[in-house]
Image (cartoon, rainbow, N blue to C red):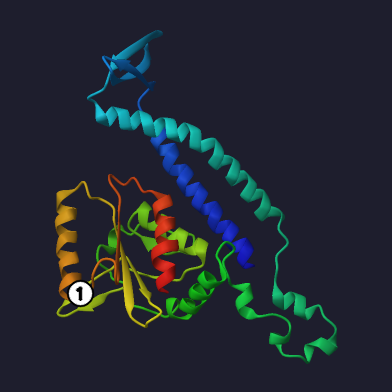
Amino acid sequence: MSLYQEQLEEMLFYYQSIADLYQADLDNSPPGSLACQQHYGKNQFLHIYRDHGNRCRRVITKDIDLQQSLARKEFAVKALPILKENIASLQHAIDNIIPFDPDHILNSMTKGYAQLPREFFFDKDSLAVSLHLDQEQESRILRHRDWGKTPYHESTYYDDIKTMKTSRGQRVRSKSELLILEMHYHFGIDVHYDEELLLGSSIVVPDFTYQGEDGRLFFWEHMGMMNRSDYVAHNYDKLKKYYDAGIYVGDRLILTFDHNGSIDMGMIESTLIHEIIPRL
């Protein structure tokens, strides 16, 4: 499979995953829609819905949860047609693409060419770069690739809840981790997921581990349940272990956050482009 076809399939999986999330939002959303009007110079939010065929209006200015649910519903309504159109276009492209296999092309040449070294025909690295990165970014990703593919010891902590699988078969605990790994695949970045790290006498398990250009490891922690006090407490202890070991946010530690499992994929992509790749 060519890199182009591989990235198309990873992009397809990404769009399908996002569409599933928005479809779930739509399926679980309340009936009706949101409206806003001015009331004594202030915004007043209304829930517009039908009850036994009658059109009803209810003030929900103080009901933040319902406002959010209706907002997510409206966003899903607008987003799903775009995602579905992209999914159909990608599927069509994948179905109709002609596989690019360098070995097959070489084997189709006359015998005279078979005596030449492979590197005469193409630069092997040129077949493995991302489709949407500049030359420096591509070279950093390629430089990191050998390290990223080295075997490592993945933690078995909470292994029983790693019930989701990425398109490459990596088992993960959450949709957020799945989508973040799929975004890594999209950019061609190899990463160690849930690799055990010894800090002094303690074992810490970063979400994602990389080797920096300077040879030092650096880490990305994505905290996805910040609305839960037990989760926050656990991660406070984890961050303290990093700090005590001289691993600081902004240097060798990158942090991103979710709330109620509501992942922002734009933020994830930006983190990869502006925080991860420049360090590789």
Q: Is residue 10 left or right of residue 161?
A: right
Q: Which residue is mark 1?
A: 203
Q: Quadrant of residue 29?
A: top left
Q: Quadrant of residue 118?
A: bottom right
Location of residue 189 in the rendering, given as x and y in whole percent from the top left corner: 47, 69
Image height check: is 43 above or below 201? above
The residue under the point 73% across, 86% down is 120
The residue under the point 60% across, 78% down is 125
Q: Return the residue nearer the eye: 209 or 104.
A: 209
Mark 1 secondary-structure assignment: strand
Q: Quadrant of the C terminus?
A: bottom left
Q: Is residue 25 left or right of residue 87?
A: left
Q: In this rendering, does residue 27 appear at all?
A: no
Q: Quadrant of the N terminus?
A: bottom right
Q: Return the residue nearer the eye: 113 or 256.
A: 256
Q: Return the residue nearer the eye: 43 or 263.
A: 43
Question: How busy is the neighbourhood of tag 1: few (under 14 within 10 Å), some, or many (20 plus)?
Answer: few
Q: How many marks?
A: 1
The residue under the point 67% across, 52% down is 93
Q: Amino acid at mark 1?
A: Ile
Location of residue 168 in the rendering, given as x and y in whole percent from the top left corner: 48, 64
Location of residue 165 in the rendering, given as x and y in whole percent from the top left corner: 42, 59
Location of residue 250 in the rendering, given as x and y in whole percent from the top left corner: 29, 66
Q: Return the residue nearer the eye: 188 or 6.
A: 188
Image height check: is 5 above or below 33? below
The residue under the point 19% across, 48% down is 228
Q: Is residue 175 left or right of residue 102?
A: left
Q: Is residue 43 left or right of residue 108?
A: left
